[in-house]
Amino acid sequence: MATSSPGRQPQNDGCHTVSLSGHVGFSSLPDQLVKKSIEQGFCFNILCIGETGIGKSTLINSLFNTSFDDPVSAHFLPNVGLRAQTYELQESNVLLKLTIVNTVGFGDQINKEDRALSCTVLHLQKIKEVLFLGAGHSLKTLDLLTMKSLDSKVNIIPIIGKADSISKTQLQKFKSKIMSELVSNGIHIYQFPADDEAVSEINTIMNGHLPFAVVGSTEEVKIGNRMVRARQYPWGVVEVENENHCDFVKLREMLICTNMEDLREQTHAQHYELYRRCRLEEMGFRDIGPENKPVSLQEAYEAKRHEFYFELQRKEEELRQQFVQRVKEKEAILKESEQQMQSKFEHLMLMHQEAKLELGKKKKVLEDQIAMFIEKKANAELLQSQASVSTPVVSLKRDKDRKNSNFI
């Protein structure tokens, strides 16, 4: 920013001059980002995958020094389910929105003779990191297959859970065997970054301690004059935060205190971008064209848009032709139906005319019969009336003849 030199009056007639009270520059940008980040808070989502009873909840509680409400699950669930719970944590003036998703029923439907257990930790939408917990002599096939399917999507940090159940000699052999199995199966795990001078030395050392052997506990035990988180056994006490007993402190420092932001960056810059690239390639967007020449995303988008537009037009024309064809078929069916109806109607009309003519003939015959009946009736009535008039004259004559015979 340009400023006027002392003792020199600026040539800005009519303008109000404001004197600078301090340094002006962009060196305060980091402070602005820190302030904004603190005000907004941070999000950290964890998905824990593992058999019931492996110690997933105890590990999470130990890592964040909080007792999260996680209901106990049964061992005999038919399917694997997800149970998500969100918590708001605060340390000093920093807010953390922590989402813990537990996989209920994972691995409980398989043979448990081999006690290699596993736990996976990952982000729900933007995956952060993955932790596998194991106890036994080797990893299960399920563990290896799960890690193999996730290593391109998440940051994997191998962990040996319940490390207090293994002797130190067996533990070192187990660590070597796990790393050998991961390499032989082509599983890529998260490596703590060694390019930052501030943490290069400690991260390099910690990479050599993988997989971490941890012990989790939320119970406090009094040792001397201090209370420590530990697991009490008849033979002694295993301190969670004692580096001579387990690698819990190393895990907490590397995961939460030192490399949490790098995990977030790796998720976005590597895993999410890889996922995004694969999805774009599935949709037809590629960096190289048909002639192996570089193609920009805009060119690929325009080509895909034109291809989609032409395909849409083709389908529209195909649908239109199908519609026209169906309309013609319907019209033909309707026309045929109309012709059939017309033929049936004409047939019925003809039958009606024939029936009408037949009825007319029968009516004419009946009318003639009625006329004949009326005529016969009239003749019969006439004869009857004539007969009734002639009968009294004959009877009077007979009476007269009878009287005359009597006089004789």
Image (tube, rainbow, N blue to C red):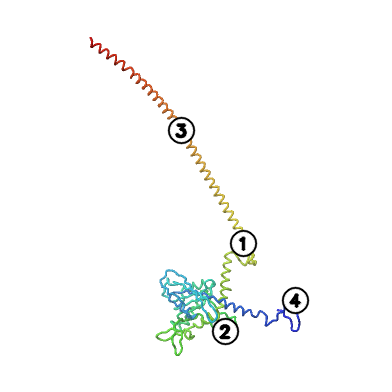
On the image, numbered disc 4 is attached to which residue? 14
Residue 264 vs 325, above or below: the answer is below
Q: Mark 3 and mark 2: span between their CA atoms?
A: 117 Å
Task: From the viewer's side, name the closer residue of 385 and 269.
Answer: 385
Mark 3 burial class by Cα count in 10 Å: few <14, some 14-19, many 20+: few
Which of the 4 image quarters holds residue 238? bottom left
On the image, numbered disc 3 is attached to which residue? 356
Mark 2 burial class by Cα count in 10 Å: few <14, some 14-19, many 20+: few
Residue 263: image x %, image y %? 55, 77
Quadrant where the C terminus is found in the figure: top left
On the image, numbered disc 1 is attached to which residue? 305
Q: Residue at x 62, y 61 (%)?
A: 305
Q: Residue at x 47, y 34 (%)?
A: 353
Which of the 4 image quarters holds residue 388? top left
Q: Secondary structure at mark 4?
A: loop
Q: Mark 4 and mark 3: span between their CA atoms?
A: 116 Å
Earlier in the chain: of badge 4 and badge 1, it is 4
- Which residue reaches farthest bottom? 224
**Mark 1 vs 3: CB contact within 8 A:** no
Q: Secondary structure at mark 1?
A: helix
**Mark 4 vs 3: CB contact within 8 A:** no
Q: Residue at x 34, y 18 (%)?
A: 389
**Mark 2 vs 1: CB contact within 8 A:** no
On the image, numbered disc 2 is attached to which residue? 201
Q: Mark 2 and mark 4: span between their CA atoms?
A: 61 Å
